[in-house]
Image (cartoon, helix red, strand yellow):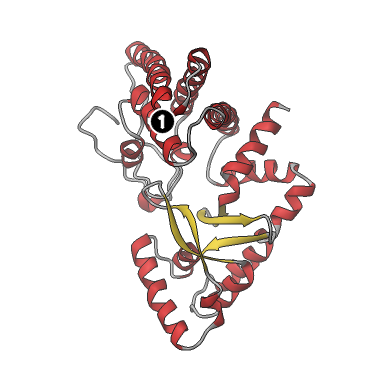
């Protein structure tokens, strides 16, 4: 039941915004009223054109969009501007379309990935309805996605438990006058920088991550200390009865400091740094970032 609740909450907060196609993430948004998935058009275009550079994929879509408009394509007019997480971690508006519209756009891009992605869309485009009637499917799918991305069973277990701790912290924030998204990000970064000595952005740079989720590329130790920092933050906030952004900055710093002290003690005992440049990226992006701050 513990893990079931954890995965259900993660599914509601984050999982519904991502899907995996051949190891690559595609952002998506669930419209509860229409009961439809909306997928990021640029993410689909990047896969069809085999373009790992987000900016170049966006430029390709911009040119294609202009051409289709001139041709009077209805597919372009059916694209919506929805907020999705950008490369910098902030929510930004991007073109998104439902499965039917994406399938039409796919026909406009010559690609060997066209047929595979059509089949993929037919499957994942309607999985939300299945998950509503059988939540176990979403939990199993989460495990399978992490396994496909090279995670061990031990890592998956730690990731799920860490998510439960994270969910309890954000629940506290939500009910104590902390605004979602921007203020969550501010407090999360304070906690992270306090325990690790790196901001979230810097930690992602160390691992050579761009749009990827940092936690999906953490080592076992990084997951453990992240969880310790967030657990400590919540318990301190509850004790202090912190409300709003400014008051919650105090427990964020104190909670992060508890994890930092534990990290420093472990590093002293083992002679190894906890912050690691290792990641689960494809081989083409595996080269690790060279730090001037002692990270290997």
Could you tell whether 78 is left or right of 186 in the image?
A: right
Most extreme residue toward the right is 133
183 is higher (above) or lower (below) than 162: below
Above or below — where is 121 with respect to 173?
Answer: below
> Is 131 left, or right, of 254 in this rendering?
right
Residue 55 position by quadrant:
bottom left
For label 1, the crowd category at 10 Å Cα-Cα, with few meaning under 14, some 14 to 19 and many 20 or more, is many
Badge 1 marks a residue whose secondary structure is helix
Residue 258 in view of the camera:
yes
Foreground pick, 237 / 30 = 237
Above or below for 274 versus 10: above
Task: Evaluate whether residue 53 shows in this view.
Answer: no
Q: Which residue is mark 1?
A: 187
Left or right? Give the position of 102 relative to 68: right
Residue occupying the point 37% across, 60% down: 54
Relative depth, front residue between 220 and 196: 196
Q: Position of residue 35 (x, y in %)?
A: 70, 59
Image quadrant holding the C terminus, namely: top left
Q: Position of residue 212 (x, y in %)?
A: 44, 47
Q: Nearer the viewer, residue 145 or 262?
A: 262
Q: In the visual, does 131 lie left or right of 152?
A: right
Q: Position of residue 63 (x, y in %)?
A: 38, 77
Q: Residue at x 55, y 61 (%)?
A: 39
Name of the residue lying farthest toward the bottom: 71
Q: How many marks?
A: 1
How far across and how far down the image is residue 68, in percent? 47, 83
The N terminus - image quarter: top right
Which quadrant holds residue 199? top left
């Amino acid at each position: 039941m513990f893990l079931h609740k954890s995965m259900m909450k993660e599914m509601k907060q984050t999982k519904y915004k991502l899907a995996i196609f051949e190891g690559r993430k595609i952002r998506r948004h669930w419209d509860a009223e229409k009961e439809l998935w909306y997928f990021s058009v640029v993410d689909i275009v990047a896969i069809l054109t085999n373009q790992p550079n987000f900016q170049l994929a966006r430029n390709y879509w911009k040119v294609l969009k202009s051409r289709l408009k001139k041709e009077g394509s209805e597919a372009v007019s059916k694209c919506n501007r929805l907020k999705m997480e950008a490369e910098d971690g902030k929510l930004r508006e991007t073109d998104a379309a439902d499965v039917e519209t994406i399938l039409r756009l796919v026909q406009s891009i010559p690609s060997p990935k066209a047929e595979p992605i059509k089949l993929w869309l037919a499957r994942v485009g309607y999985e939300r309805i299945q998950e509503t009637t059988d939540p176990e499917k979403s939990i199993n799918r989460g495990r399978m996605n992490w396994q496909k991305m090279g995670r061990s069973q031990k890592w998956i277990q730690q990731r799920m438990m860490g998510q439960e701790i994270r969910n309890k912290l954000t629940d506290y924030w939500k009910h104590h006058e902390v605004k979602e998204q921007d203020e969550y990000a501010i407090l999360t970064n304070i906690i992270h920088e306090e325990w690790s000595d790196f901001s979230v952005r810097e930690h992602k740079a160390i691992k050579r991550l761009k749009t990827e989720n940092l936690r999906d590329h953490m080592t076992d130790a990084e997951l453990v200390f992240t969880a310790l920092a967030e657990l400590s933050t919540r318990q301190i906030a509850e004790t202090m009865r912190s409300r709003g952004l400014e008051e919650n900055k105090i427990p964020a710093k104190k909670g992060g400091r508890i994890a930092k002290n534990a990290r420093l003690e472990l590093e002293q005992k083992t002679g190894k740094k906890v912050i690691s440049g290792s990641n689960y990226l494809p081989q083409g992006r595996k080269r690790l970032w060279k730090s001037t701050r002692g990270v290997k």
